[in-house]
């Protein structure tokens, strides 16, 4: 994104402290400008219609009109306009009905509120360009739910047809399970820079835009299958603190 480009953002969340935190994160980027805030869905719709922001950062669960209905109204109203308003939905809850509902309403992306600040800034910039963003963890849950409705995945490619190295395939499996670069680095006992290099190589070799597309590819290729839990998932769970004795 060029330094001269400024993306206008409308914040919609019923909690003032959350909006303040989001404003601080977004305005730390020279490309983003928060033009207004809304405390409920109705106010979000009114502000979007009057201000025509590039992106609405929309909380899904709000009193009165929720974020799903507000998203539907904003997207439908803006569709005939030359200036499209993109909605990036956020929620504390990754329940399937929220994810499916807001994406069906026309949102361009869905993230959990505990996403790292850099991921939030990047997601806003991505949807402002007209692309889509879904948290990899949320995406793989959706794929697990809806994959039985899709055609059967193709068989694993022959070794001489697979452009990825053994380590890159291992990294791709972990990406598809929703692991972060830091978690992958800790599990493989390598530096996070090394993991980032593997991720970049995977995207380049497979012609993919981002980690979301990488997750979809992992499912479509059969590298990861719905409901499948890898050995790495078990190792991840074993590192989590157990209940007090």
Image: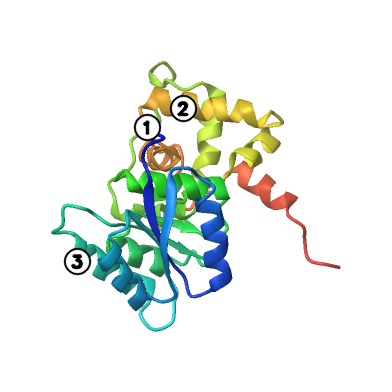
Q: Could you say which is closer to the camera, residue 157 or residue 90?
A: 90
Disc 2 to disc 3, how far (Cα)?
Answer: 39 Å
Q: Could you say which is closer to the camera, residue 47 or residue 65?
A: 47
Quadrant holding the N terminus: top left
Residue 31 is left or right of residue 117, and the answer is: left
| Residue 113 visible at all | no
For mark 1, does the 10 Å Cα neighbourhood hold few (<14), some (14 to 19), or many (20 or more) residues? some
Q: Element under label 1?
A: loop
Quadrant holding the C terminus: bottom right
Residue at 39% x, 84% y is 64
Mark 1 vs mark 3, foreground winner is 3
Earlier residue among tags 2 and 1? 2
Q: Which residue is mark 2?
A: 202
Residue at 30% x, 66% y is 48
Disc 2 to disc 1, how far (Cα)?
Answer: 8 Å
For mark 3, does the 10 Å Cα neighbourhood hold few (<14), some (14 to 19), or many (20 or more) residues? some
Q: Residue furthest bottom?
A: 64
Counting from the top left corner in percent of width and height, residue 209 is at: 37, 34
Residue 235 is left or right of residue 195, and the answer is: right
Earlier residue among tags 1 and 3? 3
Disc 1 to disc 3, how far (Cα)?
Answer: 32 Å
Counting from the top left corner in percent of width and height, residue 56 is at: 37, 60
Q: Which residue is mark 3?
A: 77
Mark 2 vs mark 3, foreground winner is 3
Counting from the top left corner in percent of width and height, residue 86 is at: 31, 55
Earlier residue among tags 2 and 3? 3
Q: Which residue is mark 1?
A: 208
Q: Residue furthest top?
A: 160
């Amino acid at each position: 994104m060029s330094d001269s480009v400024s993306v206008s953002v409308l914040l919609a969340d019923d909690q003032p402290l959350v909006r303040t935190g989001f404003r601080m994160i977004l305005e730390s980027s020279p490309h983003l400008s928060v033009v207004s805030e809304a405390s409920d869905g109705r106010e979000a719709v009114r502000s979007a219609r009057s201000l025509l922001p590039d992106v609405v950062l929309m909380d899904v669960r709000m009193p009165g009109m929720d974020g799903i209905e507000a998203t539907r109204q904003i997207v439908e109203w803006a569709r005939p306009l030359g200036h499209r308003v993109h909605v990036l939905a956020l929620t504390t809850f990754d329940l399937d009905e929220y994810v499916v509902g807001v994406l069906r309403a026309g949102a361009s992306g869905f993230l959990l509120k505990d996403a790292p600040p850099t991921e939030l800034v990047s997601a806003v910039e991505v949807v402002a360009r007209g692309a889509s963003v879904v948290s990899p963890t949320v995406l793989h849950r959706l794929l697990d739910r809806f994959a039985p409705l899709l055609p059967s995945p193709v068989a694993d490619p022959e070794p001489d047809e697979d452009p990825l190295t053994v380590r890159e395939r291992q990294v791709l499996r972990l990406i598809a399970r929703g692991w972060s670069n830091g978690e992958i680095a800790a599990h493989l006992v390598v530096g996070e820079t090394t993991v980032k290099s593997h991720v970049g190589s995977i995207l380049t070799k497979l012609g993919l835009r981002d980690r979301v597309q990488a997750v979809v590819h992992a499912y479509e290729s059969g590298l990861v299958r719905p409901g499948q839990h890898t050995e790495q998932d078990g190792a991840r769970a074993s590192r989590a603190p157990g209940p007090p004795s």
